[in-house]
Amino acid sequence: MTNLEKKSLPDIRNRIDAIDNQMLDLLKERLQCAREIGQVKAQDKRPTWDPKRERMIFQRLEAANNGVFPWPSLLSIYREIITTCRLSQNKVEVAYMGPEATFSHLAGIKCFGQSAEYRATETIEDVFVEVEKGRVQYGIVPVENSIEGAVTSTLDAFVNHRVRICAEVNLPITHNLISKTGNIKDIKQVLSHPQPLAQCRQWLRKNLPEVPLKSVFSTAVASQMAAEDESVAAIASELAVKTYGLQVVVRGVEDYSGNSTRFLLLGPESPSASGADKTSLLISFHDRPGALHETLSILARRGINLTRIESRPVKGAVGQYLFFIDMLGHWDDNEVREGCQQLKELCSFFEWLGSYPIGE
């Protein structure tokens, strides 16, 4: 007879209750330790967020887990615990392009958990304004999608507003067809933001060929309209299902697997080096041959790896462009800082947008 057979169901449940009580006591103790850390940091005028420390915690936990507890779930649990403890030191408000339950909102939750206060804005540029004016500590904005490419409104906003990139969040995008009834036969119209509609075009053409599609301001607006009309379906996130009391008609209606969006966390200043970082620049050159090649050569000679370069036209100046550059490394790294200083001498415009931990 095995040990499991010897134990009765009440015995096992009693053991679970005892474990839960022990976990709760330890969580309360951890929260108190976090508050004490907050007091020490306040005395030393140090930032409450230490990305290097958080990365070390996650790495240590993953190694200690030995694959027993499913790591994505364990990571989610500890991210919420760590964020809640950090927010006990200082309440955080995060601006995002709303309304509630957009993918930007979901990215904010992935970064800060449910414990932060989230403030919806009407546009991406409004997020920049809220951070720049100091009305919120952070803002989160999409910058590129693995299928649709750059989010140009985010890139353009960096030109007009002085904020710093504090982190990046890579969010897997899964689109769900949702409605009030959950019955595909009730659907007479499908609404969503233009990008999700484009990312689900083939599925919609194959499965709902006669149903008209309509672009609206956001996936959340589409969800709100679906909640008010049984004949309307929305393409939106899992969060929208819970937020607006809808039902899933079909999960995963995107045409391509591996769809993800990269979001940037904006704040007043970038964090210290974590040991695995990116640096982002916004630059423009004097009009002369070979300027871009010379720029890339400066970085290449120092062994600096570029992960992205994106051009945008300068408003009102035909033939002139701004370049958004992402590179591996932190501004505090000698090679990065010295390379950027040399690069600055060649540029007609140079703005360091921030250095921040590489997203998972």
Image (tube, rainbow, N blue to C red):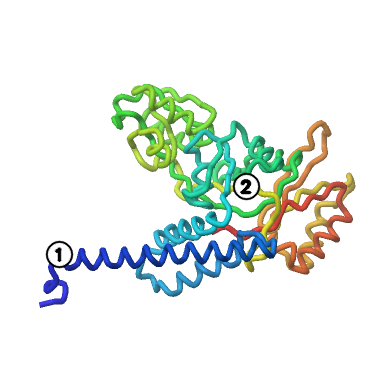
* Mark 1: secondary structure: helix
Q: Quadrant of residue 337?
A: bottom right
The residues tagged by marks 1 and 2 sit, at their Cα atoms, a distance apart of 48 Å
Q: How many marks?
A: 2
Classify the position of the N terminus by image quarter: bottom left
Is 180 positioned to the left or the right of 212 in the image? left
Q: Residue at x 59, y 34 (%)?
A: 121
Could you say which is closer to the camera, residue 198 or residue 263?
Answer: 263
Front in this rendered view, residue 117 or 228 = 117
Residue 213 rendering spot, x and y as whole percentages: 45, 25
In the image, residue 356 above or below residue 162: below
**Which class describes the residues within 10 Å of circle 1: few (<14), some (14-19), or many (20+)?**
few
In the rendering, at what x and y percent does residue 306 appear? 70, 59
- Please name the residue shown 79% across and 49% down the image: 283
Which of the numbered marks, if any, corresponds to residue 138? 2
Question: In what element is the residue under mark 2?
Answer: strand
- Residue under label 1: 9
The first of marks 1 and 2 along the sequence is 1
Q: Residue 36 appears at what percent x and percent y?
A: 56, 65
User: Looking at the image, is 94 positioned above or below residue 226?
Assistant: below
Among the 4 quarters of the image, the one containing residue 248? top left
Give the residue type at disc 1. Answer: Leu
Vertical arrangement, residue 172 with respect to residue 206, above or below: below
Near-viewer residue (205 or 69):
69
- Which residue is at 73% across, 51% downward? 353
Horizontal and vertical percent position of residue 230: 34, 23
342 sits left or right of 137 in the view: right
Would you call the spot at circle 2 few (<14 residues within 10 Å), some (14-19), or many (20 or more)? many
Q: Name the residue: 27% across, 67% down.
A: 18
Is there a contact, CB below 8 Å, between mark 1 and mark 2? no
Q: Amino acid at mark 2?
A: Tyr
Q: Which label was assigned to residue 64?
A: none
